[in-house]
Amino acid sequence: RPTSPTQAHAPILRVQGLTKRFHPDFPPVVENVGFTVEQGEVFALLGPSGCGKTTTLRLIAGFEQPESGQVWLEGREITRLPAEERGIGFVFQDYALFPHLSVFENVAFGLRRLRGKVRQARVLEVLGLVGLTVFKDRKPGELSGGQQQRVALARAIAPGPKLVLLDEPFSSLDAALRQATRDEVRALLKQAGIGAILVTHDQEEALSFADRLAVMRSGQLEQVGTPEEVYHRPRTPFVAQFLGRTNLIPGEARGLEAETPLGRILLSEEAHGAVLLSLRPEGLGLAMPLGHLGISGKQLEGTVLAREFKGHDMTYRVQLGNRELIVQESPESPFRPGDKVRVLVRAKAVVVGRGQ
Ligand code: ATP
């Protein structure tokens, strides 16, 4: 198939206006979803359980047909192409390995089109890549969860796809193994130059694994961006809250400042009128009330409700007027429940919506 100059620079995957409904009386499970994945890029679809992530992945893989919208792979439309002709790898949540086949045979399964020696060489090459050569004759049941996960990955990448789809592949691993496996898989994909889409409901996993991610809610994408963008510049209250703890505060914006219940605070970008602002706990701080220091002056005085020691920081819940704030301080900070504290605003607030 000839590649035109535009195709050579085409994203590995383009999804446009994808909509899927399982039942005519219910709203679509996936609605007007669109995004692109560049060559070799690791992308994540992040959202709460039931928001439509897996269905989106299955539409891309060809296991489901959309009601409308298109899927393009390297500039070629594949919306109606059967799954087995798409050349996309898939790693299922439960790995879906064949229990009666050896590790070697499981990986070879995806290479039915290759013959004898070539096939064998490719299986050994991929097993080497995922560090499982010594286990090649074992059955999946004789491996740990992390090892089974690597067999599933090896099987998905053996045919040499440019894109693999990973549906919550780390969810059955315990916390320590999950992080190590995640780092390994990411390094492997990058080394092989394979693009990937990871489906997860774990914000930390999406932030650390992906080059870019899409935050999904009730079948729709709320925001697409780099981990830094979606964390530091969320566009909606949902994105702000789903990516970590935050304080949502109403305000009246005038350019680069806003009047709020926390006083006048700076904004990360210009806005006007009633707004809803997000301030992360690390953007707030606590200090002794001015009175304790023998100084009189205007201050935001609150009361500590609770504190939580987290090793690398101390997180406080503070009552300020009728509002409860989450504040992150250094682990040595001395305040205790009941203490009066002065609340400091240390960062610019982000506009996440219009106010009432
Ligand atoms: P989870 O993280 O829990 O897997 P998800 O974000 O991946 O959730 P989906 O599995 O895509 O969500 O499901 C989205 C919605 O579509 C759910 O309400 C689910 O019940 C519904 N759904 C999924 N598959 C089907 C199907 N084959 N028939 C009917 N409804 C379905």
Image (tube, rainbow, N blue to C red):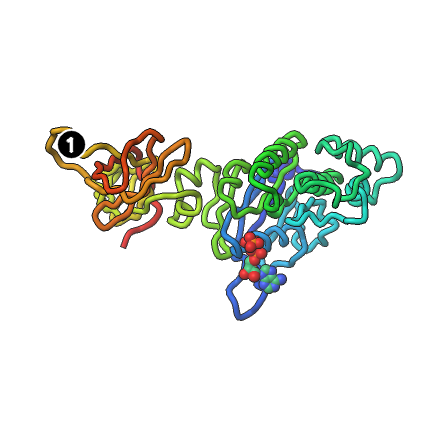
Q: Which residue lies most toward the right here? A: 116
Say which of 298 and 25 sits in front: 298
Going 33% across and 29% down the picture, which residue do you hit? 332
* Residue type (three-letter) at the residue carrying disc 1: His
Q: Position of residue 89 (x, y in %)?
A: 69, 44
Q: Position of residue 142 (x, y in %)?
A: 75, 42
Mark 1 Cβ and ligand 1 under 8 Å apart: no
* 86 left or right, relative to 298: right
Going 48% across and 37% down the picture, which residue do you hit? 226
Location of residue 22 (image quadrant)? bottom right
Q: Quadrant of ligand 1?
A: bottom right
Vertically, is 112 above or below 65?
Answer: above
Quadrant for the N terminus, please.
top right
- On the question of residue 222 being in view, the answer is yes
Q: Position of residue 43 (x, y in %)?
A: 56, 41
Q: Position of residue 85 (x, y in %)?
A: 74, 49
- On the question of residue 18 being in view, the answer is no
Vertically, is 24 above or below 304?
Answer: below
Q: Which residue is mark 1?
A: 292
* 68 left or right, relative to 88: left
Q: Secondary structure at mark 1?
A: helix
Q: Which residue lies most toward the bottom here? A: 25
Quadrant for the C terminus, please.
bottom left
* Crowd class of label 1 (few under 14; some 14 to 19; many from 20; radius 10 Å): few
Location of residue 259 (image quadrant)? top left
Say which of 326 and 116 sits in front: 326
Say which of 142 and 273 sits in front: 142
